[in-house]
Image (cartoon, rainbow, N blue to C red):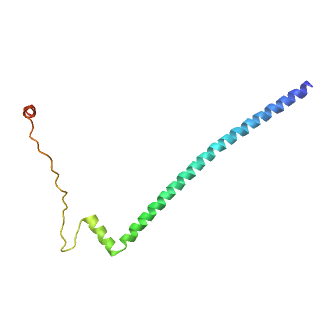
Amino acid sequence: MRGKQIRRGIVIGFLLLVVAWLVSLIWGLTGKAQVAIREANDAKSQYQALEARKSVLQANLDALATPRGEDAAIRTAFGVARRGEEVIVVVPPATTTPTATPSWWRRILSWF
């Protein structure tokens, strides 16, 4: 009887160790799965950003493929104009600042 109980205790102890080992493996796999999901979401958002950038660049290329687009790009990049064109400088309206005469004590303090 005593020998049978010892064997049962050893078997139960061994099974508990196996269960603990399996739980630790499952815990590690769960962490790795979470990392993989996070990485997949990051890759998806990067892909979407690259697709948006690609569409903007394609629109720019389409605009540059026209003669008007080439002309605009050259004008912007090199600051050139066609013959007969003149430069127009747009000046913002002058702001009027009220000019108040400083008081006598401010004039005295400004000397220091």
Q: Nearer the viewer, residue 13 or 42?
A: 42
Q: Nearer the viewer, residue 97 or 64?
A: 97
Residue beneath the point at 10% across and 34% down: 106
Residue beneath the point at 63% across and 47% down: 33
Q: Is residue 100 left or right of residue 75?
A: left
x, y percent for residue 83 = 19, 74
- Residue extending farthest to the top is 2
Quarter of the image holding residue 29? top right
Q: Is residue 50 above or below residue 16?
A: below
- Residue extending farthest to the right is 1
Q: Which quadrant of the rendered structure holds the C terminus?
A: top left
Q: Is residue 60 above or below residue 29?
A: below
x, y percent for residue 4 = 90, 28
Q: Is residue 17 left or right of residue 31?
A: right
x, y percent for residue 38 = 57, 48
Residue beneath the point at 40% across and 71% down: 62
Quarter of the image holding residue 10? top right
Q: Is residue 47 above or below residue 74?
A: above
x, y percent for residue 86 = 18, 69
Q: Which quadrant of the rendered structure holds the N terminus?
A: top right
Q: Nearer the viewer, residue 35 or 21?
A: 35
Residue beneath the point at 22% across and 70% down: 81
